[in-house]
Image (tube, helix red, strand yellow):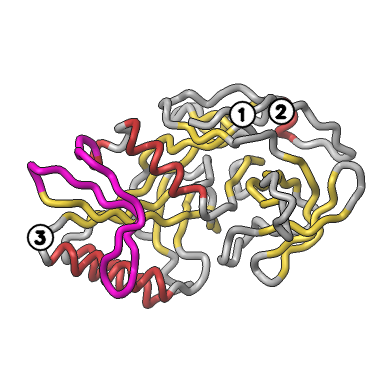
Amino acid sequence: MRSSASISRTSWAAGSPLDAGHKTLDPEAKTVFRTDHAPLNMLNAAMQFSSSLIPATLARRYKRFLADVVLEAGDVTTVHVANPGAMTGLDRPLSRVWLSDSGNPLRKYPYTWELVEADLGSGPELIGVNTGQPHQLVDEALAAGLIPELRDYQSIRREVKYGENSRVDFLLEDPARPPCYLEVKNVHLMRKPRLAEFPDSVTDRGAKHLRELAAVRAGGARAVLLFVIQIPSADRFALARDIDPAYAAAFAQARARGVEMLAWRCAINLSGIEIATPVPIVEP
């Protein structure tokens, strides 16, 4: 687990409801959304940011992978957006955002957009927009034995070649049982309160992964697709069939052929992110 430096509270011209420190949106689920530096430590599988996140205000997102932001001092800078999707409801100008600093002076865009404050129907909350983070989150969760369906494998390997010129995100192996091929998908779309959806844009690559998982399942291995929801208010998950009907069809076919589907939501604060709670997969 990576260490994180303390995060000082920021003074904003326009205050945020999250500035009070913490807010419980769902007392029954006991999900707490914090903006201070208090550690998550809810399940001991947290991914902590390697340094303090930098607050900024979003000016615009463009060319999918770039955004212009205004830093606290008033400087405008361009940052990397590690998200190829539509980011519906998350890329509104003037949104409050947080950036990580690569610390690499050779990078053209040393800052990466990590979090955004948005209200998707349950009040303002911190939402993760970096689609690369779920792989680290799952790595931590597997090491901690957090996900019951994926426990007790002797070895875990990442980015192993399989299928049609692809690499599976994780390959779990144990001499006592068949190998388990695990693909991970990031989820950050919410069009109805508490209902997370995937995908937020057409994903031919995602449909290809479903076909490949179905193929390894037919060959006798386990195949699992894990949706990691970086929206803490989500309490259920569904496919966005209207956005990508072909993906929805591939999902149904893979499930019918024995591919296991799981969905877990995250807890998020300015210190880090952790996979926290499973949520049911439902019909929209």
Name the residue: 72% across, 52% down: 110
Amino acid type, residue under disc 1 in the picture: Ser
Amino acid type, residue under disc 2 in the picture: Ile
Q: Main secondary structure of the magenta part?
A: strand
Question: Are the residues tagged 3 and 1 within 8 Å (C-beta)?
Answer: no
Residue 270 seen in the current view = yes
Amino acid type, residue under disc 3 in the picture: Gly
| Secondary element at tag 2 | loop
Q: Is residue 98 above or below residue 243?
A: above
Q: Which residue is mark 1?
A: 4
Name the residue: 54% across, 49% down: 193
Q: Is residue 166 magenta?
A: yes
Specify whether 259 is left or right of 57.
Answer: left
Q: Which label lies toward us, 1 or 2?
A: 1
Which residue reaches farthest front?
Answer: 106
How far separated are the C-alphas under marks 3 and 1?
42 Å
User: Closest to the observer: 275 or 153?
Assistant: 153
| Secondary element at tag 3 | loop
Q: Which residue is mark 3?
A: 220
Residue 22, given in percent of the width and then of the height, sits at: 64, 26
Q: Residues within 10 Å of mark 3 (few under 14, many from 20)?
A: few
Residue 180, given in percent of the width and then of the height, sits at: 21, 52
Question: Are the residues tagged 1 and 2 within 8 Å (C-beta)?
Answer: yes
Residue 117 seen in the current view = no
Magenta extent: 151-177
Q: Is residue 24 above or below residue 58?
A: above
How far separated are the C-alphas under marks 1 and 2?
9 Å
